[in-house]
Image (tube, helix red, strand yellow):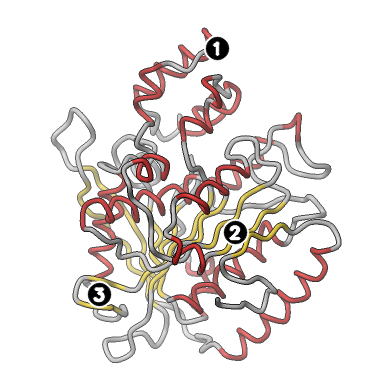
Amino acid sequence: MARYPFGIVAGRIGVVMGSQLTRVLAAVFAAAVATVVAAPVSQAAPTVVNGCIAGVPDPGTTVPVRICYTIFRPEGAHSAHRVPVVFHSHGWGGSRATAPEGFADFLGAGFGVLSFDQRGFGESGGVAQLENPDLEGQDVQRLVDVVAGLDWVKTQRPGDPVIGAIGGSYGGGYQFVGAFSELRDRGATRFDALAPEITWHDLGESLAPQGVPRTLWALLLYAAGTPSAANPQAATVGLVEAAVTGNWPPSLAAFVAKNGPAWHVSQGRKLDIPVLFGQGETDNLFPLDQGLKNFQRALTPSARARSIMVGYNGGHTLPSVLPMGAPDAAEFLAATAEGGLPTDDPCSKKLNDSDFRALSLRFFQEEL
């Protein structure tokens, strides 16, 4: 089992609260210093390239959907010195990061980064399909193809780049849909490690536990998707019905049935790569059990032995159940849309923000 300077052992589930946090933070600080000393920190500005690919047409249309991205190449990466790449994408309602300052830690440690706008958001076209393997899954696969063609990216074999992925909430969903859709379509995923935060195992179960819709959350998420016209028609109609009747419509259940690890697991698929999970203990949209189910069910035994799950006080929370000092729902949605996971809760402020990211970086340094 791999051991990390954070005091966490691969293959374990860690819950960090209260006085434990002080010890974890001290270890994180020490690890961060050691990492900075050991890593080849880039002093020059990275090379930044923007582009778009042609994605799969939306259902009922024939025009390819534009999926736009930004690639950051760290200083010193070239055909004779190839480096791994870390994928990044945003939360629901957000857009990709286009400034290198947002990835100074990964770029400084020698990783390339690809950040992209998911279908329906930012500069990308189309309508969000809520991480459908036949749509968003194909988008992610085509972005992996782009990275595989770069002569400065480390590969295991032609067409198979060494890649990891980060992102929270909807930005965790793309990681699973990309990896699992490759497993379905290619027999293996080209992702080598993932680090999803506060994301789901079963989207239908999360949005409507035991068939009862989380109406307020559904309406808030719908509102966040409205400015970019990302909301699919099926979700619009279904959410109206759910709000009026208090029942989860069969049409909406069918729409999200394939959109998460639960469906792939039901088809006999499990990922055989290490995963660093971060899940909020007080999350009332994608609760802690969603992360536990991913840890327990979505991985092979060998992958689970190399994986880590960290539970912390935070995540998606509505005002009625917020920890003291945590941001309100509107502030949280705005922050996660921009790719951040902030909280003012004294138990988890560091672990839920910069320190989980630092752990993700250390995880990738170990696994990529």
Mark linked to residue 246: 1
Image spot of residue 290 (x, y percent): 55, 43
Measured Cα–Cα span from mark 2 to mark 1: 34 Å
Closer to us: 87 or 97:
87
- Residue 312, compared with residue 245, is above or below; it is below
Q: Residue at x 54, y 23 (%)?
A: 210
Label 1: state its secondary structure: loop
In what element is the residue under mark 3?
loop
- The 10 Å Cα crowd at callout 2, few under 14, some 14 to 19, many 20 or more, is many
Amino acid type, mark 3: Leu
Q: Nearer the viewer, mark 1 or mark 3?
A: 1
User: Quadrant of the image for the C terminus?
Assistant: bottom left
Crowd class of label 1 (few under 14; some 14 to 19; many from 20; radius 10 Å):
some
Q: Are marks 1 and 3 in contact (CB under 8 Å)?
A: no
Name the one closer to the observer, 328 or 363: 363
Q: Which residue is mark 3?
A: 150
Q: Are marks 3 and 2 in contact (CB under 8 Å)?
A: no
Which residue type carries mark 2?
A: Met
Quadrant location, the N terminus: bottom right
Q: Quadrant of residue 324?
A: top right
Of the residues under marks 1 and 3, which one precedes in the sequence?
A: 3
Residue to which mark 2 is pinned: 309
Q: Going 48% across and 41% down the picture, which residue do you hit?
A: 92
- In the depicted view, which residue is nearer to us: 151 or 193? 193
